[in-house]
Image (cartoon, helix red, strand yellow):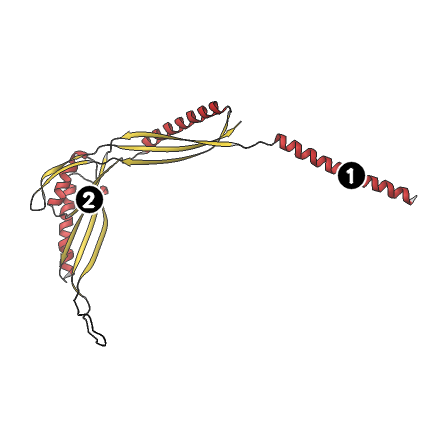
Amino acid sequence: MDTKIKNYLGWALIGGIIFSVGAGVWYVNSFSQSAPTNRNFFVAGEGKVVAVPDVAELTFGVLTEGGKNLGELQKENSEKINKVIAFLKENNIEEKDIKTQYYNISPRYQYFSCPFPLAGESVACPPAEIVGYSINQNVLVKIRDLSKVGDVLAGVVKKGANNVSGPNFTVDDPTELQNKAREEAISKAKQKAQAIAKSAGFRLGKLVSISENSFPQPMPYMMESAFGKGGGPEISPSIEPGSQEITANVSLTYEIK
């Protein structure tokens, strides 16, 4: 009797193992047939919009050098920079468009030339000493009336600025132009994706992801100027803002059906 029970239990165990293995094979086979292959591909598109700048940015500075009396030197530098800023305001440039970027006070040293000591000799060399100070202040200004750029350039030099760079032309609010460039980039990318799918013989699935880059590409300006021997312009330089491109680059990732 015990032997029969043991035989039944053995056959039941073997049957259970066979059933489990068969069920596992069936599940794996069914999942492999139903699970998506998750094949993707991506395309890129670029959109460009040409814009005429509406703002010119100009950086000017006043460098003042003098002796050890730092108070007098600060007063002299402040008078020069204030005269330039007053000129800007007289030309209807608002305070919000005038920004101090840099203010620096640095000592000027007198260095001494000492003879090179011979072997075994010791030569005392006096340390460098401060003989005066330099004050450098830079200001960034936005000029919204581009017809005044040449006059402003000439005027700040005449009023005392001795370090001028620019102008740098830009679009004050490029949001709308960036949107247009982005729309064009996406449209081109979609057309490219459809063309690739047609040529390769597959269907486009859903759009999985999108990434984007947008940036302006400033174009160089043209400038003609005439300066007198005294360091100031005799006439206002002729300034042309030119144009710049707002560019958007997008990448689209699609599923392949």
**N-term mark: 2 or 1:** 1
Which image quadrant: the N terminus?
A: top right
Q: Give the residue at mark 1.
A: 16
Query: Residue, x 16% and y 52% (percent of image)?
Result: 63
Image position of 79 with respect to 178: above or below: below
Residue 161 in the image, given as x and y percentages of width and height: 14, 47
Between residue 115 and residue 85, name the one nearer to us: 115
Amino acid type, callout 2: Ser
Q: Please state the total of marks drawn on the protein image.
A: 2
Disc 1 is placed on an element classified as helix
Image position of 106 with respect to 54: above or below: below
Amino acid type, callout 1: Gly
Query: Residue, x 66% and y 31% (percent of image)?
Result: 30
Query: Residue, x 39% and y 26% (percent of image)?
Result: 188
Residue 27 in the image, given as x and y percentages of width and height: 68, 34
Residue 211 in the image, given as x and y percentages of width and height: 42, 35
Outermost residue on the bottom side: it is: 120
Query: Residue, x 33% and y 36% (percent of image)?
Result: 215
Within 10 Å of disc 1 (Cα), the crowding (few <14, some 14-19, many 20+) is: few
Outermost residue on the right side: it is: 1
Q: Give the residue at mark 2.
A: 165
